[in-house]
Image: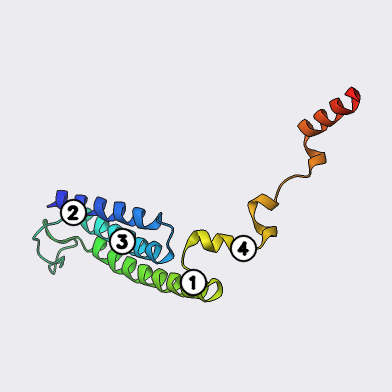
Amino acid sequence: MELVFAGLVGFLVAGGAYLMMSGQLIRFLFGLVLLSNAANLAIFAAGRLTYATPPFVVSGEKVPAAGVANALPQALILTAIVIGFGLLAFALALAFRAWQSLGTTEMDAMRACEPVSLTAAAVQPPVEDDPALAYDRTRMEVAE
């Protein structure tokens, strides 16, 4: 059974990564949800999949009996579900605001909406600071 869960986790991670690299904001959010669910499933599978009894401690003993279900992965999954839902709600709010401001959900088009002064092409050193160009300019002046 762990092999099935491992395959499913791999499938969810691959699908989530594919969706996140597609360049569409909505697909990115769906990929984020898939990755979150893959992490939850991996934590669940790490807690041993057994048809065990609940992790109750019998009175008079200090530890539960052997073969009981592990409660820690279940608690971690509950926490991860809440965190994943909060992250999704925040990402949806950001996506909606980006769509309102820019009028598109394509990431390449969002990049084109940035001011020219903030793009990587605008952050280039001046020509005078480039030693190779200064050397070429000196050679041209000497040749004249």
Label 2 Cα neighbours within 10 Å, binned few <14 / some 14-19 / many ≥20 = some
Quarter residue 54 falls in? bottom left
Q: Position of residue 78 (x, y in %)?
A: 29, 69
Which residue is depicted at the point 8% across and 60% down?
51
Label 4 Cα neighbours within 10 Å, binned few <14 / some 14-19 / many ≥20 = few
Residue that numbered label 3 is attached to: 34
Q: Are marks 2 and 1 in contact (CB under 8 Å)?
A: no
Residue that numbered label 1 is attached to: 94
Q: Closer to the N terminus: mark 4 or mark 3?
A: 3
Residue 5: assigned label: 2
Answer with left or right where residue 30 lies relative to residue 144. Answer: left
Q: Closer to the N terminus: mark 2 or mark 1?
A: 2
Indicate the amino acid at tag 4.
Glu
Residue 142: assigned label: none
Identify the element where label 4 is drawn. Answer: loop
Answer with left or right where residue 69 lies relative to residue 12. Answer: left
Q: Are marks 2 and 4 in contact (CB under 8 Å)?
A: no
Q: Nearer the viewer, mark 1 or mark 4?
A: 4
Q: Closer to the N terminus: mark 2 or mark 4?
A: 2
Q: Closer to the N terminus: mark 2 or mark 3?
A: 2
Q: Nearer the viewer, mark 2 or mark 4?
A: 4
Which residue is depicted at the point 79% across and 41% down?
127
Q: Are marks 2 and 3 in contact (CB under 8 Å)?
A: no
Q: Nearer the viewer, mark 4 or mark 3?
A: 4
Identify the element where label 3 is drawn. Answer: helix
Residue 114: assigned label: 4
